[in-house]
Amino acid sequence: MSHGASPLATFHLIGDRADLEGPRTEAGAYRPALFGQYSDLSSLRTDFPVVLVHTLDSGVWLKSLTDIIDESLRTITEPGPENEELRRQVLTQEQTIRQLVAGGQRGPFSKLWDDAARIRSEEHPEIDAALQKAREAIGLDGDVIAFDSQLAGRLVTRAWQESERLKSGRLQSRIDRLAQKLSDILQANYINSADARQADKLESTMGSANQSVFDFQAMARILQTAPAAEALPESRRQRIQSAIEVLESQRFVSTASKRSQNSKPTFGFSFADCATALKAFSERLPAMAELIKAISIAELEIDNHYDESRHDRYFDGFDERRLGPGDLKLFPSYLVCIEEADGAAQDQLLRVIRSGLPFKILAQTSDILGDDSLAGGQLTFGTRGQQLARMALGIDSAFVLQAAATSLYRMQDALFDGVATPGPALFSVYCGADYLESASATESRAFPCFVYNPELGPGQASRYSLAGNPHPEDDWAVHSVHYEDGAHDARSEATAFTLVDFIAQKPQFEQRFASITRPDWSDELVPVVEFLQLSGRAKSDKVPYVLLIDNEDVLYRAVVDEKLLDAARRCLACWHNLQEMGGIKNSHAAAAVTQARATWEQEFVPPVAEPVQAAASSAQAAAVTPDAAEPETAPPAEEVPPVSSDDPWIETIRCTTCNECTQINDRIFAYDDEKRAYIADPDAGTYRELVEAAESCQVAIIHPGKPRNPDEPGLEELLERAAPFM
């Protein structure tokens, strides 16, 4: 540090704020500037609340309120202005339900719908018909789940229950079928026996209404003169009877025999820790072996393939040591839901995953940063949350999913694949204090989403996915911050949401920021994302900052100390590693391309001197040949008809005045005198904002056109997302 370092540079380098002037950060007083547009989450159409669907015949187990409403609108309306009032009423009904949930109301979706309809119809009784039409189109019900600390546990448990319902149903049907067929064998053997031909036995098998018609003594005398079929050998009869008893008394699934008699209940398979689950699994191994043995014997007996000389010895020695992976697949898997696993719990968790046992483990945490002091593990600060899932990735046979709780709805297919996989599965989930904190963990790369599914193929490309992350091809997700400058003119600034922005919302780290009001902004201040790209002398006279707002929505630049910058570097390095695993910016592929290009240029590109000399020779020949023919004049090119406009546009007549687009950027989008949206200034923001507005538009009337800035980051992905709205 030079002797002439500014107070801001001094704070950045050593955390000394003695010479700083102006306001200081206070616990809870500041938050990331990008949070300014999300002051009322109940007014936004997020993925939450969700509905855990009761009616499972359709195979759907989870639906968001947003998707439920959108699907109903597609069912009951056609595009066009004549249906706009119906759309408006249904969307207002959705908003009322969101407000009820935000106020703490829970219960079945049908009840919340009726409560919201009752509230609205008191003032507008004419809407009853529209709401009834929409409710009939929805046709489902289930428990409404809001975003809270229990969300991950409820979603993982519900997915596991549905997967196990299907799996147990198959085993249950198999056991019922085998038990019935074995009973039929014994019944047929008994019917042909001398005992079954006794008069009292014949009388007991006949219905009471017809007993007076028959002479059972005479019937018995006649049947006893008929030749008797050969009875089953006693050893076979006992073997079949023993198999039936095991099939009917097992406690792994509920069978027909268990449902028809007062038998012991089935085992439980959901636990709060790995130790208890492992103990239960070990204690049940003998019963598992007995059931597998009974199933095998039953299938051999039914097909009349049991050979005592061969099979008796095998089955006499059959115990839990003979169980293999194929046998374990038949039984229910074990669900373990762990909250805030400490080091010992994580070690045990990883041992279970390595064992290959069919355990599905949810490891949930609400703290992914930890302590930023040296004693608290400074070298892991900023990457602490990612450690568990990344260690599990080293177990090639295990399914691994890492996600913030806010991403679980969009990752529900991967979640279901994980609970249904035959081997072990780990779900590492971060659930912040609220929706914004949880979602921002993914936005900032503090807790990225990824899925590793070994069942999808032999290679990394098929097994590993980064789907669910914003702008996965970039270092950081970039968004626009809208604010007023000192002259009250509207301004927009593209800003990356980094790990430092995520940390800024945590009151315990407020002393690592120094807020600067607008009059004190200077060229010395550069955004964190730019500072991270500087090196050596280039950063010696610069100080990094992030944009924060206070409780009055006043914008500040907050200088960041070096420890947070170091954490951001480590976080970015971890993200680069995940990108490379996902095939993004793969260093091996880049090296191979560079080598191939160098080889091609060496072998196929002619030296530069040759065409230059040839051109010079041709020019000299033309100069000394007076009779050289004049070159033919090329015919004029045909006039190209003008192409269609690539400007963004809105079907203004269909606008529902939902405010979605103006909340994204109220300078690109504005309302006319009839409160219908139009493009006010296509250059007042980014192409990303146009695409995001098109995606969030409730009636799909925004068309983003083509990018106006060819240098905007992530255009390839944005063009792909914009394609459905062109």
Image (spheres, rainbow, N blue to C red):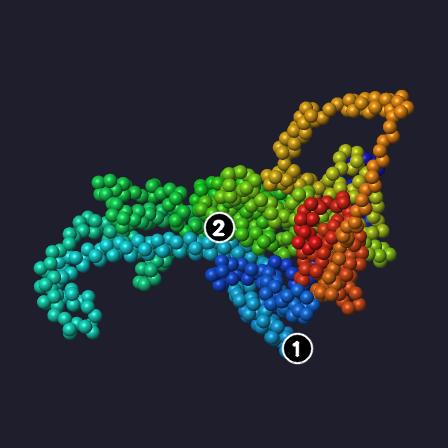
128 up-or-down from 556: above or below: below
Residue 292: horizontal and vertical position, in percent?
33, 47
Residue 420 seen in render:
yes
Residue 385 seen in render:
no
Identified at 39% across, 49% down, the residue is: 330
Secondary element type, mark 1: loop
- Spatial distance from mark 2 to mark 1, Cα to Cα? 47 Å
- Left or right of 279, for residue 654: right
Secondary element type, mark 2: helix
- Left or right of 92, for residue 25: right
Residue 637: horizontal and vertical position, in percent?
81, 42
- Depth check, front residue: 545 or 341: 545
Q: Residues within 10 Å of mark 2 (few under 14, many from 20)?
A: many
Report the amino acid beneath label 1: Glu
- Residue picked out by circle 2: 419
Quarter the C terminus occupies: bottom right
- Residue picked out by circle 1: 123
Residue 73: horizontal and vertical position, in percent?
61, 65
- Left or right of 552, for residue 111: left
93 up-or-down from 581: above or below: below
Identified at 44% across, 42% down, the residue is: 356
Identified at 56% across, 67% down, the residue is: 137
Report the amino acid beneath label 2: Val
Could you tell which of marks 2 and 1 lies nearer the N-terminus? 1
Residue 304: horizontal and vertical position, in percent?
25, 48
- Depth check, front residue: 136 or 663: 136
Q: How many marks?
A: 2
* Quarter holding residue 590: top right
Identified at 18% across, 67% down, the residue is: 204
